[in-house]
Image (cartoon, rainbow, N blue to C red):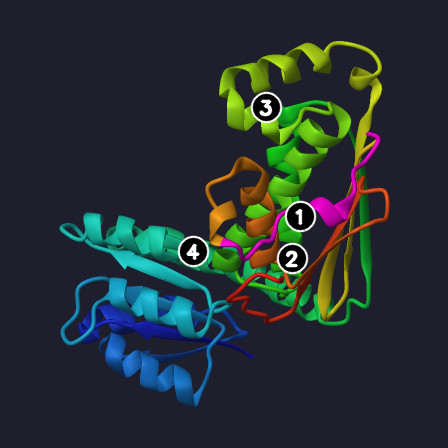
């Protein structure tokens, strides 16, 4: 049986919405008079969907949406909007509500909207449940020297880590920064062989040389290979270029404050700070970065 929680301080509107929903043979409805009471009832009995009014005493619809999204991220919420609550409803949709129904249109739209939201929510829960059974996923990309391909690939890998629950959406920003730094290093320093020393000396000359080499042989034929492996415990990212490589032992220390302002130290500092492990192969044309599930890096490696 699918359970629905209707939240409204108006007894008449409660019963009106509940009466429409209870016509469905597989739906059971229970009620709360405001957001505070709704949270108490959700804690005791988790519904499949919450249908809430916007303007209520003690805790209104917007605050309820914010609290539910924080505590029960997979629990969908549908708003009941009335004249005068439009701005609050927009804020609630931005905060995570799944859909809305104007109170004046409930007789025509409520059941259909709830059915659609429940269907989408069911798929999401099944996918989330399925992903807990994931043992391993591998991705491999081969990029030509095109800077425009790097941001969408970084985003794709960020979201893959979120889907696999290795880190949260907010933590994915730090992972994305580390991935982008590694790919840009492969592009500029690896395949195009443009030195960070030149960037320190003349910023414009650095990018002018990069543009020139991106159009000339042998640099333009080189590729960046990006491989990612996701398991229940970690994401492992390998970025490899086709340049001649370098001696990894000459890399600046990531914890030396003197290197923070230097272009050749910034990328390495960010990679080592935001990832749990960073290592280079012997010839220096491949970096492997590891992000473990639930980790919170506070300081870079030596």
- Mark 3 and mark 4 lie on one chain; the one further toward the N terminus is 4
Q: In 3D space, how far apart are the residues under numbered discs 1 and 4 (Cα atoms)?
A: 26 Å
Q: Please report contact status of discs 2 and 1: CB closer than 8 Å, yes or no.
A: yes
Q: Which residues are magenta?
A: 243-256
81 horizontally vs 78: left or right? left
Q: Secondary structure at mark 2?
A: helix
Confirm whether residue 1 shows in the render. Answer: yes
Residue 70 is situated, as x and y percent measured from the top left of the image, at 40, 69
Q: Where is 194 relative to 161, above or below?
A: above
Instruction: State the residue position of label 2.
Output: 161
Q: Nearer the viewer, mark 1 or mark 4?
A: 1
Disc nearer the start of the sequence (2/3):
2
Residue at 57% across, 61% down: 300
User: In the image, 153: left or right of 68?
Assistant: right
Q: Does the magenta segment cover residue 250?
A: yes
Instruction: Please rate how many residues cluster around mark 3, counting C-alpha atoms within 10 Å: few if below 14, some from 14 to 19, many from 20.
Output: some
Between discs 1 and 3, the one toward the N terminus: 1
Q: Considering only order in the chain, which callout, 4 or 1, is on the residue closer to the N terminus?
A: 4
Q: Which mark is residue 157?
A: 1
Q: Which residue is mark 3?
A: 198
The label nearer to you, 2 versus 4, is: 2
Q: Secondary structure at mark 4?
A: loop
Question: Residue 42 occupies which quadrant of the picture?
Answer: bottom left
């Amino acid at each position: 049986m699918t359970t629905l929680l209707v939240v409204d301080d108006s007894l008449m509107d409660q019963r009106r919405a509940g009466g429409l929903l209870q016509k469905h043979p597989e739906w059971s409805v229970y009620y709360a008079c405001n957001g505070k009471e709704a949270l108490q009832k959700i804690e005791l009995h988790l519904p499949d969907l919450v249908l809430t009014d916007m303007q209520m005493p003690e805790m209104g619809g917007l605050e309820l949406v914010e609290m539910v999204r924080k505590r029960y991220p997979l629990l969908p919420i549908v708003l009941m909007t009335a004249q005068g609550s439009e701005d609050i409803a927009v804020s609630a949709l931005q905060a995570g509500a799944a859909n809305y129904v104007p109170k004046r249109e409930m007789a025509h739209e409520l059941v259909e909207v709830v059915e659609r939201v429940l269907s989408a929510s069911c798929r999401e829960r099944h996918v989330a449940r399925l992903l807990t059974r994931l043992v391993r996923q591998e991705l491999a990309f081969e990029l030509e020297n095109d800077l425009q391909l790097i941001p969408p690939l970084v985003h794709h890998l960020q979201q893959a880590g979120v889907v696999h629950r290795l880190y949260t959406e907010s933590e994915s920003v730090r992972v994305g920064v580390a991935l982008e730094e590694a790919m840009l290093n492969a592009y500029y320093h690896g395949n195009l062989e443009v030195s960070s020393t030149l960037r320190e000396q003349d910023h414009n000359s650095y990018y002018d040389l990069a543009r020139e080499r991106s159009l000339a042989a042998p640099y333009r034929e080189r590729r960046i290979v990006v491989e990612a492996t996701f398991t229940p415990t970690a994401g492992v990212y390998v970025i490899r270029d086709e340049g001649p490589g370098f001696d990894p032992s000459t890399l600046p220390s990531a914890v030396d404050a003197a290197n923070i302002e230097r272009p050749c130290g910034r990328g390495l500092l960010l990679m080592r700070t935001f990832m749990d492990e960073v290592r280079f192969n012997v010839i220096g044309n491949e970096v492997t970065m590891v992000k473990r599930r639930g980790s919170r890096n506070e300081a870079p490696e030596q």
